[in-house]
Amino acid sequence: MCLAIPVEVVKILDSDTAIADIGGVRKEINIALIEDLLVGDFVILHVGYALNKIDPEEARRTLELFAELGELQDAINDNQQVIS
């Protein structure tokens, strides 16, 4: 399964590349598919390519849901260890 995630653009390097913040990790991404991109914009990232811009509020809500899912998975893993 492939997953596209919202990331924030923190630096634009040139017309094809930028640095994005991905949960505190900074990574170079390809932005060739997006016009008029600015620092602070949120984009949907899939396998290193920014596919389109996303509303900042929608991006934050999505990232919060991902964090909650991670916490849920951690709780499930903790309970499985106790039962085993």
Image (spheres, rainbow, N blue to C red):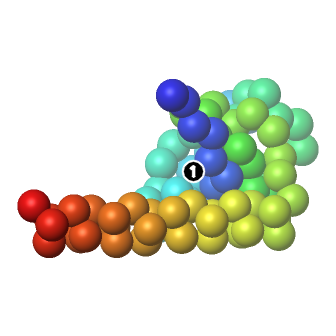
Residue lying furthest left in this view?
A: 84
User: Which quadrant of the rendered structure holds the C terminus?
Assistant: bottom left
Residue drawn at point x = 51 percent, y = 63 percent: 69
Q: Residue at x 43, y 71 (%)?
A: 71
- Write the residue at 39% across / 62% down: 73
Say if 75 sits above or below 21 in the image. Answer: below
Viewer-closest of 74 and 64: 74
Q: Position of residue 18 (x, y in %)?
A: 62, 45
In depth, the one of 63 and 49 nearer the eye is 63
Give how far across and how far down residue 58 sits, in percent.
Answer: 81, 62
- Give the residue at mark 1: 19
- Horizontal relation, residue 34 to residue 83: left or right: right
- The residue type indicated by label 1 comes to Ile
Name the spot of residue 61 as percent of width and height, x first.
73, 68
Give residue 72's quadrant in the image.
Answer: bottom left
The quadrant in which residue 50 appears is: top right
In the rendered image, the vertical position of residue 14 relative to residue 23, given as above or below? above
